[in-house]
Image (cartoon, coloured by chain):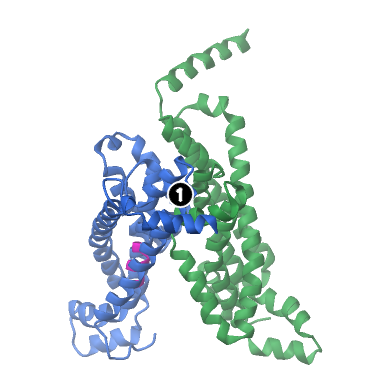
């Protein structure tokens, strides 16, 4: 019987907060949990795909810019210009190429991510101490093995710092994908405006911020786990945790290896 | 290719530039929103950031506020504000959102700019008998100027982008040409609108770079590298 009662109470409160269009509505979260989950999953999928592709594109670009100095200025210039283009315009300019599809949103987000990723990877690679390179060469490392086993691990803190910044802003920017119906939680936010549904807008917005926060913490944990040597250094010198985030600090962080 | 020639046709049709829904009117709205909000944000954020930088306090706030700003979706804030009672006052939600998103880059860059001024130079100025105010106006401010201007440029880019998104929340501005194009399933109009917005953003940034150079207090002199 108690079960039935709580069900009854639930229906009453549902009537109340959904009808009065409250900002906070527990019944909304309960009754639309599937919709919210689907939107969140789409949001995470779009963000993860964009950042992953972004890293996969940024890495060769950074290597090119490092290998041939004359390419560095155009690569950094173009990615910076892309960053200045407003998100709605970026997605709209891609419309003729991709139509109303999820690829449109992901491509736009990848283009945005390149600015910070290329910059950070390049800074990380340039900060690799020449002695480390010399030592590896002396041990008979070829260029590929040098890159893979020495340079990339040393550039990892800078790369991951870039990935963190990019991921957080990508989570926020994904909402704009709502214009083509692939905005994850943004689609719920935009729908909520049309129907004046306050609970939907607030819940989706809060979820979006929480998602950005969770992604940031997750990447911070990943960074902590993948780069134990930066930790040892930090404890020894009493450096603040923030120096690992700034690309210029990478050179100092990388020294002991 | 079709969409590009379509967009070209759209842009060269003079009817699309006239009237309340025309490009000129939308551009005027866009510039009005962006200009007013950037000015308000500068007036609010710059004095605070420069003062904090001068006395060297509040660094955590000034630096973290742009991380927070990055995590909050612009679209969500625009729509949330539109649904509050403020939404009944026309442009008010948009103007508030624009100011909110212009503040973080201004605050962070101006603060960092002030803090990165070479301490030795500041000490030398003090040793020459300059007062705190003189150090601020004659030493710190001119040396921090490039980063302050970087902040103004980022804020301007942010404001122009946010003003575009305001169209999705039902406001005016050039973004309206894009959203109207989506509603009409008119791809050429979407592309034409996006082209105009992109050009506007790049022009605004270019103009600010030029203005920054013209008003550089250290123009023609070399900055001591920190």
Q: Chain of mark 1?
A: B
Q: A257 or A184, which is in the foreground? A: A184
Label 1 neighbour load within 10 Å: few <14, some 14-19, many 20+:
many
Q: Give the colour chain A carries in the figure.
A: green
Q: Quadrant of residue B53?
A: bottom left
Q: B33 or B225, which is in the foreground? A: B33
Q: Which residue is mark 1?
A: B73
Instruction: Tell me the magenta residue range.
Output: B150-156
- Compared with B98, B157 (above or below) is below
Specify whether residue B180 is painted magenta: no
- The overriding secondary structure of the stretch rendered in magenta is helix
Specify whether residue B155 is painted magenta: yes
Residue B107 locus on image (x, y percent): 33, 63
- Compared with A7, A153 (above or below) is below
Residue in the image at 50% along x and 52% along y = A173
Which chain identifier belongs to the blue chain? B
Residue A103 locus on image (x, y percent): 62, 52
Q: In the image, A66: left or right of B216? A: right
Q: Is residue A232 something one can see in this rendering?
A: no
Name, please, the residue furthest toward the right. Answer: A140
Residue A230 locus on image (x, y percent): 62, 72
Which part of the image, by quadrant, shows the C terminus of chain A?
A: bottom right
- Compared with A20, A133 (above or below) is below
Residue in the image at 40% along x and 54% along y = B10
Residue in the image at 59% along x and 57% along y = A107
Q: In the image, A54: left or right of B193? A: right
Q: Is residue A227 something one can see in this rendering?
A: yes
Q: In the image, A93: left or right of A54? A: left
Q: A255 or A142, which is in the foreground? A: A142
Which part of the image, by quadrant, shows the N terminus of chain A?
A: top right
């Amino acid at each position: 019987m108690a079960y039935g009662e709580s069900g009854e109470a639930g229906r009453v409160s549902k009537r109340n907060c959904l009808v009065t269009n409250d900002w906070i509505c527990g019944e909304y979260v309960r009754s639309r949990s599937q919709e919210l989950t689907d939107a969140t999953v789409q949001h995470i999928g779009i963000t993860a795909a964009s950042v992953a592709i972004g890293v996969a594109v940024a890495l060769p670009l950074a290597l090119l810019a490092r290998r041939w100095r004359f390419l560095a200025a155009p690569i950094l210039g173009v990615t910076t210009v892309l960053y200045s283009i407003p998100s709605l315009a970026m997605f709209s300019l891609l419309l003729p190429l991709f139509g109303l599809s999820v690829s449109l949103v992901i491509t736009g987000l990848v283009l945005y991510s390149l600015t910070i990723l290329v910059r950070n990877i390049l800074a990380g690679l340039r900060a690799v101490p020449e002695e480390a390179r010399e030592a590896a060469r002396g041990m008979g490392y070829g260029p590929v093995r040098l890159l893979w086993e020495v340079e990339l691990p040393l550039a990892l803190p800078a790369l991951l710092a870039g990935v963190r910044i990019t991921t957080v802003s990508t989570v926020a920017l994904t909402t704009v994908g709502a214009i083509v119906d692939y905005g994850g939680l943004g689609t719920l936010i935009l729908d909520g405006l049309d129907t004046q549904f306050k609970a939907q807008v607030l819940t989706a917005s809060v979820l979006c911020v929480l998602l950005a926060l969770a992604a940031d913490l997750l990447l911070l944990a990943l960074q902590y786990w993948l780069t134990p040597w930066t930790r040892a250094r930090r404890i020894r010198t009493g450096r603040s945790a923030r120096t690992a985030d700034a690309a210029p600090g990478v050179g100092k962080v990388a020294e002991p290896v | 290719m079709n969409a590009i020639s379509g967009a070209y046709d759209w842009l060269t049709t003079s009817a699309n530039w006239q009237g309340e829904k025309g490009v000129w009117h939308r551009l005027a709205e866009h510039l009005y929103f962006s200009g007013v909000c950037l000015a308000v944000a500068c007036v609010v954020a710059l004095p605070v950031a420069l003062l904090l930088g001068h006395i060297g306090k509040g660094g955590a706030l000034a630096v973290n506020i742009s991380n927070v700003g990055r995590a909050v979706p612009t679209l969500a804030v625009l729509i949330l504000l539109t649904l509050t009672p403020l939404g009944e006052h026309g442009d008010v939600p948009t103007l508030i959102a624009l100011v909110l998103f212009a503040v973080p880059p201004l605050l962070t860059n101006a603060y960092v700019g002030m803090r990165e001024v070479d301490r030795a130079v500041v000490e030398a100025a003090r040793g020459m008998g300059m007062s705190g105010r003189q150090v601020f106006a004659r030493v710190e401010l001119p040396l921090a100027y490039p980063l302050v201007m970087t902040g103004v440029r980022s804020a301007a880019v942010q404001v122009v982008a946010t003003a575009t998104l305001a169209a999705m929340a039902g406001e005016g501005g050039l973004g309206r040409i894009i959203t109207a194009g989506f509603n009409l399933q008119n791809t050429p109009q979407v592309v034409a609108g996006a082209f105009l917005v992109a050009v506007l953003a790049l022009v605004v940034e270019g103009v600010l770079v030029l203005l920054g150079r013209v008003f550089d207090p250290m123009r023609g002199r070399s900055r001591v590298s920190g």
